[in-house]
């Protein structure tokens, strides 16, 4: 159990269900004195908010966060900061059938077994993608901490279905490019690709179907020396968080799975001396390692890619079982959904990255104020 | 810090350096009454042991484990079990140069920054792949616990460099196939592929180079209902451990990155009713999810693939920097190494999987004895 | 940091400040299927509620808990259960002076240093005794779990100021006695003592002063075998929680500090064989150990005593310092307060004990439903 | 389970049994660059070592620690530091009877239940006071870290049986007094009291009996601002560790249980302005709080008292049960033991305090080197 608490130096404790009165998060361990710009937080929430166009679910939620503790006179106090988000547009009636009929690809069956039939099944309950809203809020708080340190995080849609964007340049990717991604609803390098991706999603939607994707994320300006070997490697921590996001089924760092067919002489990133304001620092010519050696940042951009499966909720008839009668059945499931959840996963991955990086910084006792 | 302790319900605490007097592990939280077959443990240690053929490093280590606590009259006592492995074949003189000259692809530079120059650099110190020996020992203990529950874990070399083995059948993979893999030094489905892989490795070795690979792992007979949503998902826990193993740069579950180009109607695993000794249980026709929905096992085989980068140590000259003089240099590094570390990573991944699965079981209060 | 999260198998995450909009708690790791009687929870909250007579602060709070997650159709779901309590009767204006003038005995100065001046000082902020309300709520949930196992917990006022109640009989204390204590506002063995204690408190109140006390707690019907040696001893866990309650300055188990002047032959609890429905079990004739040997319950009543210092807030002038001007000053602090906080600490200690015992049970994988 | 791992920012993992081949500890999370004086460590080990006079057990152990990892060229490396201590003077034959006959006051019965009969019972196994040797070693390492920060920790025997030493002055206790205590086998203020205490112990010994005691500890020179409210209070952390030491049954901070009969006006420590090298800092005139307000240090000496029960092992005949036959019996137990374990508990409490304080410092990211 204890599945909904994360972190070492900051901890977030996420609560709520898709169709309960509200959802939220307690952030414990925040340093005192972080100045929070609430407008920036709203902007982050808006990036994930549903109901904004045909590429996302039609559920309409304001996703306004009420901060009820840990925040005083514009600054974090150092006490737990709790943010609460009301659920307003619930249609629980849509979910009466899934009480017994298990949706393929969803957690209905596994939750039924795990929680002995006591889980709140409506809209997926605590398993719902809606629970990423508090994560995005927590990430927005973390991001303001990181901005003060000059860290920039950004993600683009590397792939939607069959459509591929050009990959990031792992050595020369710029903060401005990442900031642009954060400001786009379809963060891709080329506008043309964006249009093709939209077509891909719309085509799935018209087929009562859904489609998957790959996200590529970069974290810029991290100092060398964050993280640890073994169980606290940057990869371990990042992967543990990222796999907590619904629909994620794979992650790779740097050149990732392509490293399997490479030779060491090709994969090793050779060092050279770079000068930064007269200060000599080692950097690498290439970045196959994704900015991490031995679990520790080396000062190059941290690069990772996340695979997002197609949304499990589709409107097509599917073969499945009724858990009460233990009979097979053919069913068309109702309920609003995103035809491609990968798009709305972008700010969630950014939030995950921000929280992990903040946790890495706090390990070294960084304090604000 | 605290990088070398892992686990929730059992914890392992790994200690030692490549060129110290010994390495070892304390396993805390083991249930009392697990009967340990020491021969089986030796067999597991032998799978990872170096110096056995030209495909691995020439460092010769017996890797005999002395259990100094927590084991009494053939059974675990419930107190911490500590296993110690002597380091015998050290050649620290090989490593004098890396005190200052940073090996590309290695953690020399990041460890230098992280530990302010105090790390034991000889042979990579605590970052050495040698530290996977205690992990294999701990995994062997966990595996004996799991065998009593009918769980089988096995891994094969899906790819070495350009050579690909056939993938596992994610629905019908058998325990016998996995056991066969555990008994092979080159665990692949086809003997012909094994030969080609050996040639690939030998070719890299002759070029003073190294080569990477992909491992594919299956866990059979897990009951539905293990794991949790969000931060304690099976994927989160498995990934966190697997990324602690040196050279791992990617992990994917089920159909993994291929899910990006699939439609939901294709990716969703439809349920049907299976009968097992008269007991009806839901199973899925396909297994794109890799046996995990919403972070929780669904009773199908858990399948994941791990990418292993080519060994960073190569004998070719490489461009790098001297951290003391802050000058660039061309260097040929000495030291024995594996031309393809993916091969010896197989039992380490098996051990990681065993420890994670045991931890999942203990969450539910399973006790032996 | 991370000071407000507690637990191993269940975790509680407490948030809020005395003068914020609300306070609350997230309980993570609750087993699914615990039936919750909300009236019983209200009864527990009422035990701690302020403003009910002259022996407690005049702040009036309904302390009604809104459960916003983790509870469905009358049962816990297994997902995090969040309970929220509104703050209604705030008089923040009373606290303007303590922004700079440090109240003796309070955390004003230490919080100022710890949080760099960013803490919410109003009414003590997150340090306020008001934060024990969510703890009592969480304890009430735990208590319903324990009642199903036949466990009873109760506490009486062993001492208030100079007035002493008779101690519990550590061997023969009964569940009914403990239940009686839970139903009394002044839980003592003798009504006469209660009157004297009230006089003691009233006398302190009339003097613009406060007074301390000692609570004695028993936990009945615990099976032998809960807890662990060393760092997870029952004493370690109980003490860690109990010292998180404001004003607690000491704890002792069994015969406690009196053991110092005893001989081993006197302090050792000799075993005998007891028969319980035909089942033979070892019990002890005496209970100097307070039901715990080697950190593990032995089946006898667990007995401990907690010392509660006099309320720090008093209405007398006190000598102190202004943290801004760094000058000494004489000050009379405003703000409502309890003349003897020990009385309202009783349900908080009961709640702490319930949470610790539930955590001990869950360690063994006990599950409801 | 997991009983033998402690800590947040450093973690210690203790292993071994009284009659196994060795015992030891892994210290994870040590900052790199702490210079270790091995002679000082030996001196600490000698303070706890058995067999030195008639006031302690006659078991002879060199208690030499072999550091096998995490230490390189005289400094900690930042990797786990493992220290191993051989068991040399074992007489396991003494313990054949306790396999079945439960010693009163000991953990024989509770360990039997807890570990289903699989625990190593010889000499108490993992429950043995011998396991405090690795704790003293870890504390000695922590102490060298603290000495560099000017922190001094010391403990005296406040009481042995009926004999009482004078208490520390909680405001004016000096570092020199504490250092003197560390250099004495019978750390008391008055030599005369020491003689009386020895007589008290010897008298118990001659009676085949044992006697208890109270230790009083001070920690000097802590800055204000260490610790946290609620579950991470200094009291919570210190108590949790101290109760892990065998035979401890009570702890109190500052004026402790005496606060129960005090008034707030008496118990509150009034602040004044002190000047330290021209720097003004608030201090308190009295120290009833034991240097801790709201769980956080206030810069005054941290003072606590620990109650140690009389050694459970005595040579008198005792009434008890045979766990196999479930019959009552009268038994005289063999085995060497301390007539007053409080004396040898002194360096263990010092070690506990050092580890807790180091953990508090590391929370703020203090780093050496």
Image (cartoon, coloured by chain):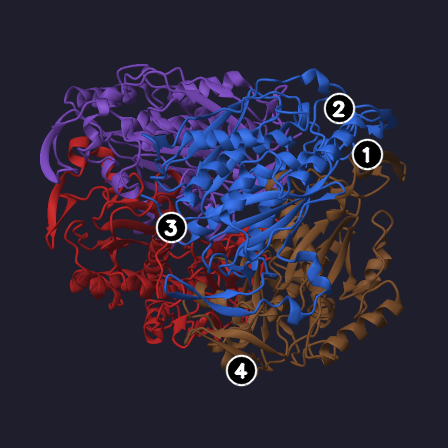
Chain colours: A brown, B blue, C red, D purple
Q: Which residue lies at the image location 77% right of the left edge and 20% below the top edge?
A: B97
Gap in angstroms between the C-alphas marked 3 and 1: 48 Å
The mark nearer the N terminus, 3 or 2, is 2
The subunit letter for the residue under badge 4 reads A
Image location of residue C315, percent across then percent down: 43, 61
The subunit letter for the residue under badge 3 reads B
Gap in angstroms between the C-alphas marked 3 and 4: 36 Å
Q: Which residue is mark 4?
A: A92
Gap in angstroms between the C-alphas marked 3 and 2: 47 Å
A315 up-or-down from A11: above or below: below
Gap in angstroms between the C-alphas marked 2 and 4: 63 Å
Q: Which residue lies at the image location 71% right of the left edge and 28% below the top edge?
A: B117
Labels 4 and 1 share a subunit: yes
Q: In which image quadrant can residue B290 be found?
A: bottom right
Q: From the image, which quarter does the C terminus of chain B lie in?
A: top left
Q: Give the foreground label among 3 and 1.
A: 1
**Considering the numbered disc 3 on the image, is that residue within a helix, a strand or a loop?**
loop
């Amino acid at each position: 159990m204890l599945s909904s608490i994360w972190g070492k130096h900051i901890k977030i404790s996420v609560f709520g269900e898709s169709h309960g009165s509200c959802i939220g998060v307690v952030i414990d361990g925040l340093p005192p004195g972080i100045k929070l710009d609430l407008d920036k937080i709203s902007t982050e929430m808006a990036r994930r908010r549903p109901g904004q166009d045909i590429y996302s679910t039609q559920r309409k939620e304001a996703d306004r966060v009420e901060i009820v503790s840990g925040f005083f006179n514009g600054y974090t106090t150092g006490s737990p900061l709790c943010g609460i988000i009301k659920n307003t547009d619930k249609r629980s009636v849509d979910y009466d059938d899934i009480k017994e009929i298990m949706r393929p690809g969803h957690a209905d069956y596994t939750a039924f077994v795990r929680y002995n039939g006591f889980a709140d099944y409506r809209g997926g309950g605590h398993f719902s993608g809606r629970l990423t809203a508090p994560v995005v809020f927590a990430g927005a708080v973390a991001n303001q901490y990181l901005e003060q340190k000059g860290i920039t995080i950004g993600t683009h849609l590397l792939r939607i279905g069959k459509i591929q964007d050009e990959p990031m340049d792992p050595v020369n990717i710029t903060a401005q490019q990442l900031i642009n991604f954060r400001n786009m609803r379809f963060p891709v390098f080329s506008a043309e690709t964006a249009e093709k991706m939209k077509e891909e999603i719309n085509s799935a939607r018209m087929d009562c179907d859904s489609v998957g994707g790959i996200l590529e994320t970069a974290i810029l300006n991290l100092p060398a020396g964050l993280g640890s070997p073994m169980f606290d490697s940057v990869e371990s921590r990042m992967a543990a968080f990222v796999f907590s996001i619904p629909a994620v089924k794979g992650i790779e760092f740097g050149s990732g799975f392509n490293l399997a067919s490479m030779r060491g002489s090709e994969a090793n990133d050779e060092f050279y001396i770079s000068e930064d304001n007269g200060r000599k620092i080692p950097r690498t010519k290439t970045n196959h390692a994704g900015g991490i050696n031995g679990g520790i940042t080396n000062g190059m951009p941290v690069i990772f890619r996340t695979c997002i499966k197609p949304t499990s909720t589709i409107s097509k008839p599917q073969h499945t079982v009724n858990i009460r009668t233990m009979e097979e059945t053919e069913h068309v499931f109702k309920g609003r959904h995103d035809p491609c959840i990968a798009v709305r996963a972008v700010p969630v991955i950014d939030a995950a990255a921000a929280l992990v990086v903040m946790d890495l910084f706090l390990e070294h006792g960084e304090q604000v104020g």
